[in-house]
Amino acid sequence: MKTLTPQVIAEITNGKYVGKESDRNIPIAGAVRDNREAKQGNLFVCIRGTRVDGHNFANDAYSSGAACCLTEQEIPNAKGPYVIVESTLESIKTIGGYYRGLFEIPIIGITGSVGKTTAKEIIAAVLGEKFNVLKTEMNLNNELGVPLTLLSLTKQHEAAVIEMGISNFGDMSILAEMVRPDIFVMTKIGYAHIEELGDLQGVLKAKTEAFAYMKPSGTAVLNGDDELLLAYDPKMRKITFGLDSHNDVRAENVNTDGLDSVKMDIVSEKSNLPIKINAYGSHIASLAPAAVAVGELLGMNDNEIKQGFLSYTPVEGRSRVSKTKDIIIIDDCYNANPNSVKAALISLSALSGRHVAILGDMLSLGEHSEKMHDEIGTFAAEHVVDMILCHGEQARFIYNSYKAAFGSEAYFYSSMEELIKDIPSKIKKGDAVLVKASRGMHFEKLLPIISDPELL
């Protein structure tokens, strides 16, 4: 396999190499944008942000082991080689796409308005039983995160699962041109980023841009419970997954065992597979068949797939459950849109005890925002949520519609400080508490308050 070096980077980006001649061909392994994360042999990408300019930390990156820097300017007293380009963001995408082309392993791309991170984790867990798998870490699913993920590939990897997140038309084309997935999984067409994309047809159009960058021999694995995806023709092999009986791979006999696990039978043309996933939330059942579909496509047997599911663990902020002595806390505050909030409320309502939902704004809904927040309030009342605590300009509509639908107990707080102050008086022993809002609402601040053993 051809090695990535400063010289190669300069050639493929039309950049200017600066440094010792003897350093032109030193091997580069991996890339980072934060000098504090730099390891031996890394490429440090100098990104000029609104508050911090990465160029100021280039020498710190060298000190941490970086082999080379990608910059937009000269580095005074540079401790190592660097390549000057017009735009480091555009160039890292070029480098990521080039580097992906050096690998012939199966690459699975994953997108969707809701569930894509959970699907990524489940699929990676299943594949990990047979393959050495690279997966997207944290939230590295955008035009910077995706190339950084691709540049983490090594010759030891046998498969890669790449999460691909978008917010506007053209974004998926940028990502797919780099990733060029062999298998593309789509979880749901929902209302995330509806402000930019207009309507659900717009969301579908934006996310399916990926198929233009796949080989005809590729496979689309689509959620057949979603009417738009069921009807969509990707012009290649299509496998549907979900809960409905018409799906090629489907979950049946789903049994949610409280907080601890979800059991189901996953039926496909090849097998009828009883599986157990050690996780909370009924939404898991609709995504698990996608992992079986991908596993079967890559030649995994039933036992390997079953064992792979057992290694799945939820990521922080994604329906992650913790227990104190007296209450259950569902940390689902990484992000929120109408589909994911409704799914979280359904899972909450299945638990024992009093159901409490602490809800904040769902962002990026544009002109649809008021209506969709209204719907959440009504939905919460209909699904036996016993109390809601709301904060946020748009969350006021959740509060109002919950009360209008004769919800049991509702409180609205104009500031985060008021909410934090009042939580100890509202939470009781035996409660199951869901915390859910868009990431920009910073509801993670509430978790230490709710988890405080002195709360009750």
Image (cartoon, rainbow, N blue to C red):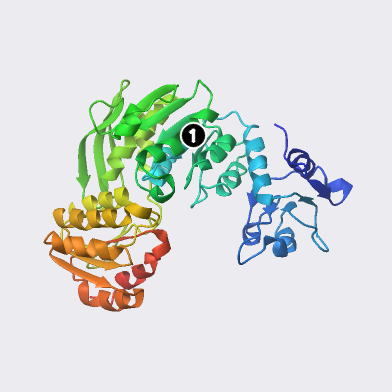
Of residue 113 and residue 453, the one placed in the foreground of this image is 113
View extreme (right): residue: 21
Tell me the quarter of the image containing the C terminus.
Answer: bottom left
Residue 54 in percent (x, y) is at 67, 61
Asked whether, in this view, residue 114 is left or right of residue 61, the answer is left
Residue 119 in percent (x, y) is at 39, 41
Q: Answer few, some or many: residues within 10 Å of disc 1's Cα (few below 14, many 20 plus, some between 14 and 19).
A: many
The answer to whether residue 212 is above or below residue 84 is above
The answer to whether residue 67 is above or below residue 395 is above
**Residue 152 appears in the figure:** yes
Question: Residue flagged by tag 1: what amino acid is it?
Answer: Glu
Residue that label 1 marks: 209
Q: Residue at x 62, y 39 (%)?
A: 154
**Residue 30 appears in the figure:** no
Asked whether, in this view, residue 4 is left or right of residue 190, the answer is right
The answer to whether residue 129 is above or below residue 55 is above
Of residue 183 and residue 153, the one placed in the foreground of this image is 183
Of residue 339 and residue 357, the one placed in the foreground of this image is 339
The answer to whether residue 224 is above or below residue 371 is above
Q: Residue at x 58, y 35 (%)?
A: 177
Asked whether, in this view, residue 347 is left or right of residue 155, the answer is left
Residue 126 in percent (x, y) is at 41, 37
| Number of callouts | 1
Q: Quadrant of residue 120?
A: top left
Asked whether, in this view, residue 6 is left or right of residue 266, the answer is right
Residue 261 in percent (x, y) is at 26, 47
Of residue 314 and residue 174, the one placed in the foreground of this image is 174
